[in-house]
Amino acid sequence: MKELLGTAGFFGTAGTVGADLSYLLAVVFTAMFTTSWVLAKKGEGTKHHNLVFISMVSMVIYFTVYYFFRQLGVLALEGKEGFGGPEEVYNGVFVPILSVHLFLVTMGLILAFYMVIQGFRSSKKIEGKYVLTEGDLKVRSTTFKKVMLILLGAWGLNQIILTFVRHASWQSSLAWALIFGTIALVISLEKAIEKWLPDGAKRHRVLGRGTMVVYILILVTSTLTYLMLYVIYPAKPV
Ligand code: HEM
């Protein structure tokens, strides 16, 4: 698989199959999310929900596979050698764009999980159709405590497995602590978000639009990264 991903790509650029495939999928996912936005705008709550759900599951599968095969994105894979342009462009343009891209991807993944859960919480199925329910939507403090305790328990269990079964490195424990920490932070942020946008339906619309904009920006930054790496400044042959 790794060898296949490293062969010449199908777009006719300097990109490999891995690079072309990940770019193609970035376009497909953005198209799916944008279509689900159009469906929501047309008041097609159920179709919107279905498409968002499929898009999110495929996106998470894609990122997991991508992570295994290409490790944390182009920089880790290509290194500086993958970029054939001048040093100033690398440091002043390419790295900042790539950093913004990685930041947006992280935000996009967190927001996707948040929005799917928020979508279920803020909508009701009426005669088989999802509709947003107007009115205050708050997490009860007992539920909040329960969720935090479950999260703590899951982290503890995972840490026991990491330490005693998998004998994993401290870096791996740290990565997992950061993942669980981020989830806890997002759940805690919900309290602040509730104050800012108490109405569940409005919260879904405002944050949903923000999420959609993040997805579009992810496509913009991945297009720029792709163009710089494989069209404008491909690596010089050694
Ligand atoms: C990544 C996840 C999601 C995003 C980014 C998202 C985004 C949005 C946006 C932007 C709107 C408002 C459209 C507009 O007026 O501009 C919307 C509406 C809506 N969403 Fe979501 N959504 C997500 C997940 C869900 C889920 C999981 C459900 C259901 C369980 C859901 C149910 C609805 C409903 C019922 C509406 C109202 C449609 C109408 O106006 O009739 N959403 N969503």
Image: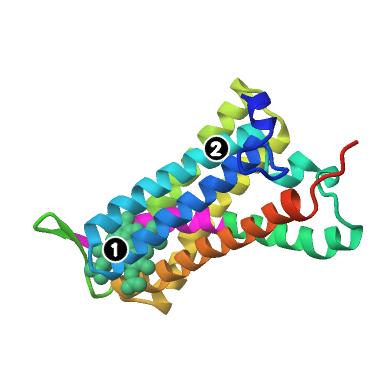
- Asked if 166 appears above or below 156 in the picture, the reply is above
CA–CA distance between discs 2 and 1?
Answer: 28 Å
**Residue situated in front as seen by the camera: 107 or 42:** 42
Name the residue rendered at 34%, 76% in the picture.
198
Counting from the top left corner in percent of width and height, residue 161 is at 56, 27
User: Residue at horizontal 59%, vertical 21%?
Assistant: 165
Percent across and percent down for residue 106 are 58, 54
Residue furthest to the bottom = 196
| Mark identifier at residue 123 | none
- Asked whether the viewer can see residue 185, the reply is yes
- Depth check, front residue: 54 or 121: 54
Number of the front mark, 2 or 1: 1
The amino acid marked with disc number 2 is Thr
Which region of the structure is painted magenta? 106-124
Using the image, determine if residue 112 lies above or below residue 164.
below
Q: Quadrant of the C terminus?
A: top right
Amino acid type at mark 1: Leu
Residue under circle 2? Answer: 64
Q: Quadrant of the N terminus?
A: top right
Report the residue that reaches farthest toward the left: 127
Query: Does residue 139 show up?
Result: no
Would you call the spot at circle 1 few (<14 residues within 10 Å), some (14-19), or many (20 or more)? some
Whether the magenta-drawn stretch holds residue 107 is answered as yes
Quadrant assignment for ligand 1: bottom left
Q: Which mark is residue 39?
A: 1
Which residue corresponds to the image point at 28% horizontal and 74% vertical from the top-left? 136
